[in-house]
Each structure stands twice: as C-alpha cells, then as structure tokens.
C-alpha cells in the first residue's frame, strides 16, 4: 500500500521525464542509427552541451593567452592556482562530514603536506632563478642562499612535523578513515602535484617547452571531440564510452600536423624560446641556439614538377615537435582514460563543476600532467646540453658555497687570470 501511495504522489511532469529518459545501454531508435551504430551528432541534446563547452573553451583559451603574454612568473602563479583547485577537488572525494566533525583541524593537515611538497618541489626547480633575482641585495642574497642550502632539511622537518601531528590526532573510532586520508593525501601529492610541477620546470627552460606541449593537448582534445561528434561510430575503450576510434585517429593526425606547424611559428619568437634565469617579468633577448635557427632543405626529386616549392626552410626543433605530437596524440590520452576509470571507481561523473561543460579543473588537467612530465624528460634527454655549461657551474656554486666561499673563489680565479696574462705577455 505504501508503494502505491508513493507512486501516486509523483507529479505528471516528473513521470514524463523518467519515461522519456534514455539510458546509455538502451537501444537507440532507427532514426539515430547509421550502419547500425549510434552517431553522437544525431543526439540533439548534445548540441546544447557542445555550445556550453565551446563558450567555456573560448574563455579558457583567451585567459590562457593573456597569462602567456604576461610572462613566466604569471604562468607559474596560474599553475599553482590550478594545483590548489585540483587538490581541493581530490581531497573532497574521500571526505566524510561525520568523521570530519570528530577531527577538528584534520583537513588542515592535508594542506600542510600539500604546501610542504610545494616548498620542496619548487625550491628544487627554481633555486637558480630565485638566487639570480636577489643578487643585488647582499643581505637578502645571504638569506636566500642559506634557505636554499638547507631547503631539503627544512622540508623534511616540516614533513616530520606533519607526521607527528597525524599520529597525535589519531582517534580510536576513526583509525580507518584517518589512515585512508593519510594514504590518499600522499597519492595526490605523488600522482598529481609531482607531475604537474614539471610544468613549471618547462616554463623556465623556455616558454616554448611549456606552451607547445600544452597546446598540443588542447588541440588533441578539441579535434577528438569534433571528429567523434560528427564521425564517431566505433567505440574506442570501455572506460570512456563516448570515445571513438574515428575521434582518436582524426585527433592524432591533426595533433601531429599541428605540432610540426606550431613549432615553426613559436620558434621565431624569443619571448617563447629564451630561458628565464630569474623571477623578473622583463622582456627577454638571447641567442636562440641551433634548435631555433632555420635550416635549408632542398626538395628536388622528392616532389612532383607542378609543386610550387622546391626548397624549404625549417627549424630543427620541428622534428622534435613531431615526437611531442606523437606522444600527445597516442600516449597522453591514456591519462584521460585513467581519470575515467578513477571516476567510475568513485561513481562520479566529474571531479568538480568549476568549468561549465567540462567538469572540474582535474578533468581538464589529466592529460596535461602526463604530457608535462614527458616534455621535461624529453627536453633534458635530447635538447638540453649534457656537458658542463657556465650556467650549470654557477648554479652549483650558488647552491653549495657560502658567500665568503664564493668571494674566495672569485679572488682565486682573479689570481689565475693575472698569472696567465703575465705568462702570455
């Protein structure tokens, strides 16, 4: 009797919505089929979603271009903000309000570990840039040099402080929840924060090594969506039912071609190719290096007679861009598949709702994290010089020697130079 009464209280409009709602595993009508497979373009409801997604994408791209124009320091700030949003979304996944009420200040412990990891990671990546920024002020230079020298110890002490804090907050009825949160926090720091921090290292190696990989992920994402929207018929992977082989292949070809062309365009701007050696925001000029100097290629018999161009000028970095494009189109999407499986495990659609039509910040950054690590490793392995450079030696001197030791080294080098000049004369 209660069931009958309850069903009779449901409004007609609600019944109508339930009746006409189609689940993903239900059979589609014949009008929405092409060769027996449902086309995403035939679903009229998807056009509204596509419009919202397009507006959000345009706003994000516009804001991203503005931040890139502002310079390296502002991009770093943008990355930090993104990391904080990602951590917030992921921390909330396992949060239980009932247990949190019994543990005042426990959420603050997660952020203690987060900012300790931030201090350690960026302290290692940006020590040279920080020292170069304060060289004009003697007192500040000594203070920063000391902090950098003992940075690892400071971070370890902060971590141990957090560890002791965690042990002291353990309560009998919440052991299971607290240890889950402890493991969850470290998993976030390892798989999310550590990987995304490589983005900052790429920025200061030259904005080119940040902007090109990030752009390729965006291009691949947009191309996969469009190809899948209009041509998608064959499912790609069960973890992401909306992903199709048509979208994957079309996006791969588009991304690789875009990588080759974009590298040529970006490679002509010193603002993008010059490394930033301090934390200032001024304009950059430098010797672009052989990677960004055009080389002549004679096509000759490789092209037909009617082809208008018999010779081309290409940047050597364009060939390396093909490797980045290949990774962005074939391997990086598996970061998205991992995130899809992750969300299925937690029975959620998106990590958040901060970006209309896209979900949360983490939903947009899954592939970017994988790409950032690869771009950094590729640059260090194939682009960055392996021999000792002046900058490398100076970085070691600044990092490991005190001010007095550096001054003594300077005086000894001066004596060596004077002796050599005397011998040559």
Image: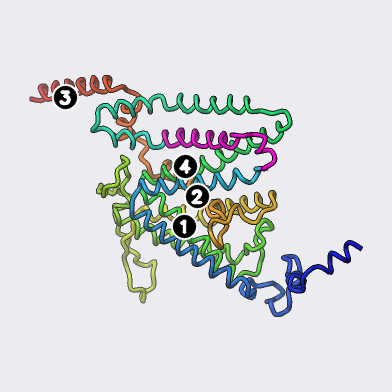
Q: Quadrant of residue 315?
A: bottom left
Depth order, front residue of 423/338: 338
Q: Is residue 102 left or right of residue 311?
A: right
- The residue where tag 3 is placed is 417
Q: Residues within 10 Å of mark 3 (few under 14, many from 20)?
A: few
- The residue where tag 1 is placed is 216
Depth order, front residue of 18/129: 18
Given contact means CB atoms under 8 Å apart, are the residues at marks 2 and 1 in contact?
yes
Residue located at (23% from left, 33% from top): 136
* Residue at the outermost right position: 1
Residue 197, numbered circle: 4
- The residue where tag 2 is placed is 371
Query: Helix or strand or loop: what does disc 2 sit on?
Result: helix
**x and y, in percent, of residue 134 in the image:** 28, 34
Q: Earlier in the sequence, mark 4 or mark 2?
A: 4
Depth order, front residue of 187/17: 17
**x and y, in percent, of residue 87 in the image:** 55, 44
Query: Helix or strand or loop: what does disc 1 sit on?
Result: helix
Depth order, front residue of 258/100: 100
Q: Is residue 67 magenta?
A: no
**x and y, in percent, of residue 21 in the image:** 73, 70
In front: mark 1 or mark 4?
4
* Residue at the outermost bottom position: 31
């Amino acid at each position: 009797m209660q069931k009958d009464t309850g069903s009779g209280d449901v409004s007609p409009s609600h019944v109508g919505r339930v009746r006409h709602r189609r689940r993903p595993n239900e059979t589609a009508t014949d009008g929405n089929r092409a060769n027996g497979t449902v086309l995403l373009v035939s679903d009229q409801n998807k056009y509204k979603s596509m419009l919202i997604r397009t507006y959000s994408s345009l706003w994000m791209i516009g804001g991203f271009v503005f931040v890139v124009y502002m310079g390296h320091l502002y991009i770093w700030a943008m990355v930090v903000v993104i990391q904080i949003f990602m951590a917030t979304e992921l921390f909330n996944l396992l949060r239980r309000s009932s247990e949190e009420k019994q543990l005042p200040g426990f959420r603050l412990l997660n952020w203690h570990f987060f900012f300790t990891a931030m201090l350690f990671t960026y302290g290692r990546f940006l020590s040279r840039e920080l020292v170069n920024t304060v060289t004009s002020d003697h007192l500040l230079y000594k203070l920063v040099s000391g902090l950098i020298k003992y940075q690892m110890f400071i971070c370890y002490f902060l971590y141990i402080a957090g560890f002791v804090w965690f042990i002291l907050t353990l309560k009998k009825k919440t052991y299971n929840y607290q240890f889950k949160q402890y493991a969850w926090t470290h998993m976030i720091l390892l798989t999310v924060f550590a990987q995304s921090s490589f983005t900052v290292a790429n920025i200061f190696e030259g904005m080119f090594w940040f902007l090109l990989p990030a752009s390729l992920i965006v291009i691949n994402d947009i191309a996969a969506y469009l190809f899948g929207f209009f041509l998608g018929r064959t499912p790609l992977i069960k973890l992401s039912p909306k992903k199709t082989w048509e979208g994957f292949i079309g996006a791969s070809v588009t991304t690789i071609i875009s990588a080759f062309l974009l590298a040529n365009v970006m490679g002509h701007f010193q603002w993008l190719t010059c490394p930033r050696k301090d934390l200032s925001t001024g304009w950059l000029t430098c010797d672009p290096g052989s990677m960004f100097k055009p080389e002549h290629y004679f096509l000759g018999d490789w092209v037909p007679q009617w082809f208008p161009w018999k010779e081309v000028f290409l940047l050597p970095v364009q060939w390396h861009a093909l490797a980045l494009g290949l990774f962005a189109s074939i391997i990086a999407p598996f970061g998205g598949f991992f995130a899809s499986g992750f969300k299925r495990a937690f029975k959620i659609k998106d990590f958040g709702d901060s970006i209309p039509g896209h979900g949360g910040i983490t939903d947009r950054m899954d592939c970017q994290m994988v790409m950032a690590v690869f771009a950094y490793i590729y640059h260090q392995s194939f682009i960055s010089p392996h021999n000792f450079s002046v900058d490398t030696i100076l970085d070691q001197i600044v990092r490991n020697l005190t001010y007095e030791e550096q001054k003594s080294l300077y005086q000894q080098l001066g004596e060596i130079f004077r002796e050599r000049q005397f011998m040559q004369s």
